[in-house]
Image (cartoon, rainbow, N blue to C red):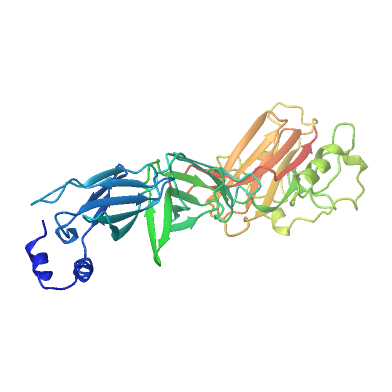
Amino acid sequence: MVPERRAGACSSMLPVLLCLLLLVGESSMFQVTVTDGNLLLISLDDSDVMASSSVYVVKITGESKNYFFQFEEFNSSLPSPLVFNASYHGLYYIITLMVINANLASRAVRSVTILTKPLPVSRVLIHDYKPSPETGVVFEVYYPEKFNVFTRVNISYWEGSNFRTMLYKDFFKGKTVFNHWLPGTCYRDVTFQLVSEASFNKSTLVESSGIGHTPQQHRTAPFPPRIISIQILQLNESRVEESPGGSSLSGYPGSDPVSEKEEMLEDQFESSAVASSHNWSDYKPSDVVTTSGPDWWLNETVTADTEGFINEIPPNQDNQSLTTSSPGADQSQPALPKYKLLATWFPPQPPTAFDGFNIYIQRDENRTEFSTVDETTHEYVKEIKDPGKYKLTIRTFSSSGSCPIRESDASKAVSFYISK
């Protein structure tokens, strides 16, 4: 049945075709909606009805085949909506309303293009990109692959206090590599949404999936400290003994002690070669670069803090606190030598987010002493009493934010030997 307001419009002696054009041109209200369950609800409006004798058919295209559905016959009230269960998520469908008259002639009245939502990502893994863990991460996303269509992935996260979001399309089998994150930074609330896009009649449709996975967090590794160097100074009862070459190191057993400074700059293999692959007695004075300590080391008072640090050097007078002799001991027996380790370094390569440095001193590969200094401290002083082989490692650490604390790699190390 044609509504009265439409019947009045076509009550004149206008040609039938012109009347149909007028009806179609007056903002037809053919509607298609998509439910969360990927159902298409297709409904007629009063403005879509042209004649009671007409048959109303819907054509649905987009999948591998076309589907046709017919509205039920109706008189005074509009038919119930058609329901189509779309198989694909993230795919665009074209729904066309067709009217078939009594002569079985059909024509398309209106077309609607809709885009279904992609199914969300169900699980995410974020781990280091091994060639550059300071700036690179590998994203692995898992999602329903069958009947799920998307063109790009929307990645959102907090970079410290800054919110970032970007559309990314270079995913291959659910994996991609980011290589532009900041070292030592906590990245939190990392989420992934699948995005589907379609262009039709000079317009673009975009639909995004929901967030179906637990938001992730990841801290990149900070860069290590730069240019680590050490000086070893021998302490006696009254003053610091320093060789003409600079710092004092004892050689391996079987070799005479020599005074040398070992510097570990950028290569752990270089330092380990100096420390363990060669006999100290084989070195000539020109083989190792050494420097003399500043004069203030000889003019200060020795104090030891609770952590065993030696922050000052004794003056040129007897200081019994540094000797190993005790009342009743044989005064002719020389005291065991003591050494002062002075390590210095430069801060890590910027831009690195970090909160301090962890210092590890390993002796004979079975005991390790650990100390921490803040980000503004770039030197470390320690008294060493026991002979043996030592390895010094200094690592940058980052702890700000909700991500777990993380250290830089331990490849930068300095090895040295103290003889009996």
Is residue 182 placed above or below 26 in the rendered structure?
Answer: above
Q: Residue at x 75, y 44 (%)?
A: 268
Quadrant assignment, res 253 = top right
> In terms of depth relative to the viewer, which is nearer, 314 or 49?
49
In the image, 244 versus 28, the foreground residue is: 28
Q: Name the residue nearer the viewer: 117 or 103.
A: 103
Image quarter hosting the C terminus: top right
The reply to whether residue 417 is visible in this rendering is yes
How many numbered marks appear?
A: 0
- Please give the name of the residue rendered at 49% of the width and 45% of the height, measured from the top-left corner: 218
**Horizontal and vertical percent for residue 246?**
81, 52
Image spot of residue 84 (x, y percent): 29, 44
Picture coordinates of residue 115, whole percent (x, y)? 36, 53
Between 112 and 88, the residue placed more toward the observer is 112
Residue 236 showing in the rendered view: no
Q: Is residue 319 left or right of residue 61?
A: right
Residue at 9%, 69% in the rendered image: 11
Location of the N terminus (image quadrant) = bottom left
Residue 151 located left or right of residue 224: left
Q: Is residue 94 left or right of residue 230?
A: left
- Residue at 38% from the left image edge and 41% from the top image edge: 87
Position in image of residue 72 (x %, y %): 18, 45
Vertically, is 329 above or below 126?
Answer: above
